[in-house]
Image (cartoon, helix red, strand yellow):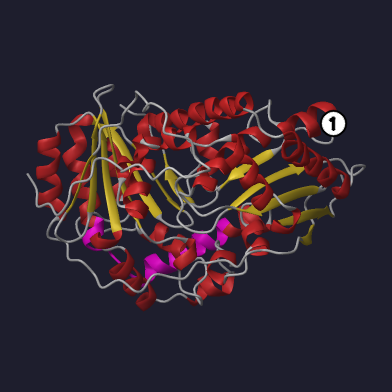
């Protein structure tokens, strides 16, 4: 079931594609390891000595239960609410090849009842306690979170553990959710102008590895083919504690929270996990161009995408700053050139992992992209010529320290905006992602310093390698509807 809900615009867009969503107005443990700091990487010729550490620090208490569940506690007494977030290391990319869309289908199944909560009772439990909840499927995880008054923390921990321990998996529930997801595909993609453009389309055109390039929403025939055994095996394998991270953030007593986590989660058995999927992409050596007819669109559209550097490399952080310079905000080079100076379009959107998250909450190959809807009098070639000129200006003129400093200010603002999003859910999202992917949620406190290490020389090196025309894919939309 997909319920329309109200969120700040930035988060609403991020959760509109794949997510079961509901919003209601807010009214001592077994440990294997503790990690609270990240050692600084060695200085290289392309990185400057580390700047003074950021003054703002997110509290991070990180440990692992005996069954493999990663737990992050982050106390914050600012407001009397708590966020509980359960993240499972299963997303679009590692779903079975003959079951496209299964990761998303299973997200819906998690609301169909568990051992002690009947169908939809999980949602009702949050509602009765004045809370907010949501679930979504992304490239590398499926997540569920609840935000409730602080005195209801134990209740929510019990409920999350109850559905991690076991779902009420029935043929009726499966059939019902198959139809819900199929209807979602029809409403959001098949019967929508620019449906799936570019967040669903571009990965399929730009990537070569099937795991990065298939239809994440799911082919209707694959959704129909899912059976009860598929669901049971999927749950038993991927929804196990040793494939998950649990975050508790907000106004709570850490000692009490640890006791509750142990009480409700410690006895859930671990599972035998399959080998990790190979997500590697070959180096792109030639520009790719594709066109897609859209019977419902009234204006042409264009999207471009460049393959990103590997996550957590110096070039990755440099690309984050190039993103700020080129496409983020009304002061960006592409907005100024395409909107303000030429009037080719009314807006330019995009970024790293755009449409499905941010540059931090993924764990594999990624695209930096941009997209726009434009008048039919403007050709795709003329738009790409402007984009090429703006990139070439940066390559020819260089990126001086003043421009780099401005990009860092914008990045810093965006990062702290992310942390504070939706009553603190943005912070829980980063903590869970860094626990799942890096085994170190305290990375949240070192990111600002990583960006400050980037030099103008590294920016130039990154621009030349990753923003070359041979590293990009261009997708255009041919409108077939009459305006």
Residue 309, position in %: x, y? 56, 53
In the rendered structure, the answer to whether residue 276 lies left or right of residue 128 reads right
Q: Where does the C terminus fall, quadrant-wise?
A: top right
Q: Residue at x 77, y 49 (%)?
A: 302
Question: 440 or 147: which is nearer to us?
Answer: 440
Residue 271, position in %: x, y? 24, 70
Q: Which residues are magenta?
A: 163-184
Residue that mark 1 sits on:
343
Residue 463 lies, with reference to residue 427, above or below; the image says below
Residue occupying the far front of the picture: 45
Q: Secondary structure at mark 1?
A: loop
In the rendered structure, the answer to whether residue 103 lies left or right of residue 285 reads left
Instruction: Inspect this view and state whether residue 7 appears.
Output: no
In the rendered structure, the answer to whether residue 451 lies left or right of residue 40 reads right
Residue 381, position in %: x, y? 87, 49
Instruction: Inspect this view and state whether residue 241 appears.
Output: yes
Residue occupying the far right of the picture: 377
Q: Residues within 10 Å of mark 1 (few under 14, many from 20)?
A: some
Q: Residue at x 38, y 42 (%)?
A: 429
Q: Main secondary structure of the magenta part?
A: helix
Q: Residue at x 76, y 28 (%)?
A: 336
Q: Quadrant of residue 234?
A: bottom left
Asked whether residue 58 is drawn in magenta, I would say: no
In the rendered structure, the answer to whether residue 456 lies left or right of residue 420 reads right
Residue 87, position in %: x, y? 34, 52
Question: 440 or 464: which is nearer to us?
Answer: 464
Asked whether residue 169 is drawn in magenta, I would say: yes
Residue 43 lies, with reference to residue 286, above or below; the image says above
Residue 38 lies, with reference to residue 362, above or below; the image says above
Q: Quadrant of residue 38?
A: top left
Q: Residue at x 45, y 49 (%)?
A: 312
């Amino acid at each position: 079931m997909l319920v329309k809900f109200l969120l700040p615009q930035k988060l609403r867009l991020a959760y509109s594609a794949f997510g079961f969503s509901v919003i209601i107005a807010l009214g001592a443990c077994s440990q294997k390891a503790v990690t609270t700091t990240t050692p600084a990487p060695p200085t290289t010729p392309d990185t400057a000595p580390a700047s003074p550490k950021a003054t703002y620090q997110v509290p991070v208490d990180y440990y692992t239960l005996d069954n493999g569940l990663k737990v992050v506690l982050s106390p914050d007494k600012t407001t009397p609410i708590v966020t509980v977030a359960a993240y499972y290391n299963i997303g679009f990319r590692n779903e079975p090849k003959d079951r496209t869309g299964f990761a998303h289908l299973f997200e819906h199944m998690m609301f169909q009842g568990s051992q002690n909560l009947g169908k939809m009772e999980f949602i009702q439990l949050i509602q009765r306690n004045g809370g907010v909840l949501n679930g979504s499927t992304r490239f590398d995880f499926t997540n569920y979170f609840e935000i409730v008054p602080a005195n209801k923390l134990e209740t929510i921990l019990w409920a999350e553990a109850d559905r991690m321990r076991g779902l009420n998996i029935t043929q009726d529930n499966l059939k019902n959710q198959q139809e819900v997801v199929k209807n979602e595909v029809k409403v959001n993609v098949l019967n929508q102008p620019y449906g799936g453009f570019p967040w669903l389309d571009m990965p399929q055109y730009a990537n070569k590895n099937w795991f990065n390039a298939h239809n994440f929403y799911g082919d209707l025939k694959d959704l129909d083919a899912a059976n009860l055994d598929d669901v049971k095996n999927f749950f038993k394998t991927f929804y196990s504690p040793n494939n998950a991270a649990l975050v508790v953030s907000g106004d709570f007593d850490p000692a009490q929270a640890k006791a509750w986590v142990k009480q409700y989660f410690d006895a859930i058995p671990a599972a035998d996990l399959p080998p990790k999927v190979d997500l590697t992409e070959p180096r792109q050596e030639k520009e790719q161009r594709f066109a897609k007819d859209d019977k419902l669109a009234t204006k042409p559209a264009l999207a471009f995408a460049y393959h990103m550097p590997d996550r957590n490399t110096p070039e990755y952080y440099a690309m984050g700053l190039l993103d700020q310079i080129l496409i983020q905000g009304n002061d960006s080079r592409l907005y100024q050139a395409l909107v303000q100076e030429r009037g080719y379009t009314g807006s330019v959107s995009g970024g790293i992992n755009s449409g499905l998250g941010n540059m931090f909450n993924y764990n594999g190959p990624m695209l930096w992209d941009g997209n726009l809807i434009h008048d039919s009098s403007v050709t795709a070639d003329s738009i790409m010529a402007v984009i090429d000129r703006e990139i070439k200006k940066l390559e020819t003129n260089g990126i001086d320290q003043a421009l780099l400093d401005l990009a860092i200010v914008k990045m810093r603002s965006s990062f702290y905006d992310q942390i504070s999003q939706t009553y603190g859910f943005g912070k829980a999202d980063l903590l869970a992602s860094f626990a799942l992917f890096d085994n170190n949620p305290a990375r949240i406190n070192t990111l600002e310093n990583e960006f400050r290490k980037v030099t103008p020389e590294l920016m130039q090196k990154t621009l030349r390698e990753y923003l070359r025309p041979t590293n990009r894919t261009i997708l255009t939309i041919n409108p077939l509807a009459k305006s």
